[in-house]
Amino acid sequence: MNIVIENKGIKTDSFYVPAFVLLESEVVVLYLFGGGYYYDTEMFLKDIFCGNIKHENVTTNKRMMFVDYFRESNFIDVFFPSKVNRYVKKDADLTNPFLVKLFEDKYVTRKTKMNSLGGTQRKLISLYVAFSKTKDIIFDLAGLDAQGAELTFKLVKEAVKNGGSAILLDNFPDMKEHASKYIQLEWNKDKLPPTKEFKFNF
């Protein structure tokens, strides 16, 4: 199998990500632990693995896409809520297998308001849209209950088995037994940030 990402080790003042290789058809779980610093750590690492930040110890052979889940976030969305049609995009190829699967849910139509859907449904929509564009993703399970997290992980594992790839940036260790590879971030306990706002230096 071809190498998608080769990480020889990422070291900052606060943590170390051990070396690993992501191959085609694999799902690597990178366990970041929880806490107020989880989000910033996740964003920093996804930028490296997506190639947005260059790191001397990381080689990316494919362009990874981060699955950024839908959130109502601005004034317009409050008064004119987003619908599935706008999120999926009007010109989307609805014959794509993943978008076909999206609309198999009887509660989801192009006119469904995104904020009327449950957390798991919104996450799955984001995944279907991502997989309609690429086979190689970086994702998380934030905001999901155990059942939703398991469903989402199984979908990703099935979707990448024929040449795709994925990295799960996780804050719970639950997916260890289901991963192709399980990597645990090593925190420098003497230099843990006091809040979630901190900078990485490598």
Image (cartoon, helix red, strand yellow):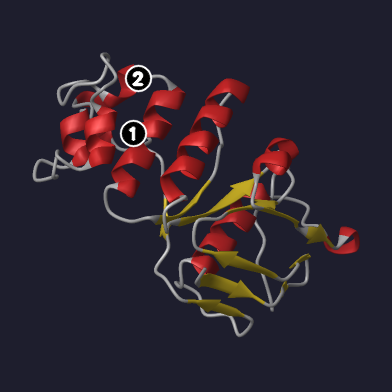
| Residue 139, percent from left and from top | 50, 48
Residue 202, image quadrant: bottom right
Instruction: Give, as a three-letter code, the residue at label 2.
Output: Leu
Graded by Cα atoms within 10 Å as few (under 14), some (14 to 19) or many (20 or more), the crowding at tag 1 reads many
Question: Residue at 20% of width from left, 43% of height from top?
Answer: 96
Can you name the residue that lies furthest to the right here? 190
Which numbered disc flags the more N-terminal residue, 1 or 2?
A: 2
**Residue 125, disc:** 1
Question: Residue at 46% of width from left, 73% of height from top?
Answer: 51
Seen in the picture, residue 145 relative to 34 is either above or below; the reply is above
Question: Along the horizontal axis of the image, is 11 left or right of 111?
Answer: right
**Residue 110, disc:** none
| Residue 32, percent from left and from top | 71, 51
Seen in the picture, residue 198 relative to 131 is either above or below; the reply is below
In depth, the one of 76 and 32 nearer the eye is 32
Separation (CA) of disc 1 from disc 2? 10 Å
